[in-house]
Amino acid sequence: MDSILQTNLLSLILFLPTAGAVLLLFFPRDQVGAIRWTAFLISLVPLGLSIYLWTQFDPAQPGYQFVESAPWFSVIGSNYSLGVDGISLPMVLLTTLLTPLAVLFSFSVSDKVKAYMILFLLLETGSLGVFLALDLLIFFVFYEVGLIPMYFLINIWGSANRQYASLKFILYTMTASLGLLLSTQIIGLTLGNFSIPNAAEFWPKLTGSFFGLTAEGLRVAAFWAFVVAFALKVPVWPLHTWLPDAHTEAPTAGSVILAGVLLKLGAYGFLRLVLPLYPVESAQFAPWLAFFALMAIVAGAYASFGQTDFKRLVAYSSINHMGFVVLGVAAAAATRATANAADGIIALNGAVLQMFTHGLSSAGMFLLVGVIYDRTHTRNLEEFGGLFPLAPVFGGILLFTSMGSLGLPGLAGFVSEFMVVRGAWPVFTVFTALAMLGLLMTGAYILKGIYKSIYGPLNQKWVGHHLEISTREVIAIAPLLVLMLVIGVWPAWLVGVINETITRFMAG
């Protein structure tokens, strides 16, 4: 049994949610309670397996671990190949953690519950496939598969403007993926296979002429195709305009997975593919990447401050926070295999940690916005005010989560953003200094959200209404609060896993 688990652990984590979705197909649609609990219990199994994976993972061992490989599309050299390292493992843990919490929070959904839960489980498989894939074609397939469930979640269970938001989401992301698909095919056909480790070794060294272009010209074209596809998914300014609409219209749990997991797919694409496959091009264009990161940090913060819709405020904050991830990636791209690699190591450690910590804080914020919306049926900050006495538990959790998103020392967000800033400062001093304007406005929009909702004059309109958070909702958000605190005071357990992989990578 242990041997089967060890040799197929990643496949079990990847496909158990899909197996659960197939199982739910046989449930009568009117058995709502059974469907909810079955989906929740099934979603806990990948989490348990991911925790086991974490305990068995050896950070000091170079290369990928728990590798699985089998022929898939042998004619073109594509294999079913999975593996994890110190970069992908935290993302697997984050995905398998947020999915059961989102499912538990969704117990309040009463319309088409069976289809809703099936889509969530399929969405988990799509996201995990990206983080586990060691084959370019497999990576692309899962990268696209994850879009379909999210499209339907927004389109069917979203708010009033859901059709516009879902169409915009799918058009933006799929259009950008066309260049990614073409470039992936070019790499696979040129090298004879689609292996990501093989591509990282041979694609940067390729010489000669292919498809009427020099190898150098081909790499530059493919580099920009990859960058645009992943930058739009992060998203990076000015490719961000789909995100606020998608977040605002999505159901609460959909926003949790969108912010906590799907945005990380773009950042992960930079880490897994752009930096290893295009080291020369990444270093050459790193200042441009840093500039776009700066714009995301500053523009995202100022746009967030300007919102009166609570959910839209949180949506724009994701652009701001993910900008720090891109800044860390830019610093690493500029310093890899150079005398300043130590700065890039710190920045890239911070970027990966920021992906994880933002997943926690953004998920928490969206859950809390969903709680207050379920009670008041409004997200307009101007209609709240002074709600703390009416919902003290909710107010306390909102205050804690907001401070985590703000980056208060002692909480997780501070550690990751500090590492990015510390690593990027010697590399892109001007860009990093200007990014502090975004950090300043982060405090402003967070305090605005708190003041307009739970502080300030009490809006008498809500007196007598039940606004307090429920026990089920507290259970759904509690793990996020615990992890924000634990990482804030003891980040070594997570950074230690990330750092070993990044240090080896940055050595060139």
Image: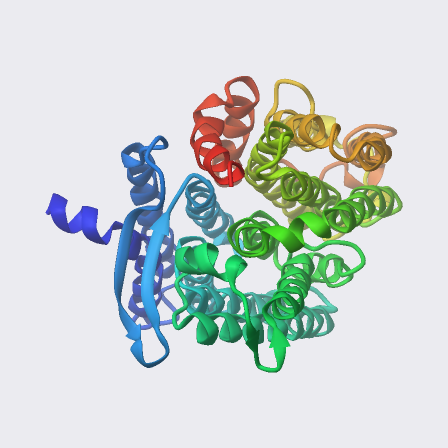
Which residue is at 87% across, 43% downward? 302
Picture coordinates of residue 437 (x, y %)?
Answer: 87, 33
Query: In the image shown, does 469 or 381 lie closer to the viewer?
Result: 381
- Counting every numbered tag in the picture gives 0
The quarter of the displayed image where residue 357 is located: top right
Picture coordinates of residue 414 (x, y %)?
Answer: 66, 25
Which residue is at 65% across, 30% downward? 340
Can see residue 231? yes
Picture coordinates of residue 393 (x, y %)?
Answer: 61, 28
Which residue is at 33% across, 72% downward? 25
The quarter of the displayed image where residue 147 is located: bottom right
Q: Is residue 49 above or below residue 241?
A: above
Picture coordinates of residue 434 (x, y %)?
Answer: 86, 35
The chosen color scheme is rainbow
The quarter of the displayed image where residue 68 is located: bottom left
Can see residue 111? no
Q: Is residue 145 above or below residue 127?
A: below
Query: In the image shown, does 203 or 471 lie closer to the viewer?
Result: 203
Q: Does residue 5 appear to the left or right of 101 in the view shown?
A: left
Q: Is residue 491 above or below residue 241?
A: above
Outermost residue, left side? 1
Query: In the image shown, does 12 or 110 lie closer to the viewer?
Result: 12
Which residue is at 78% across, 51% downward? 288
Q: Does residue 158 appear to the left or right of 463 in the view shown?
A: left
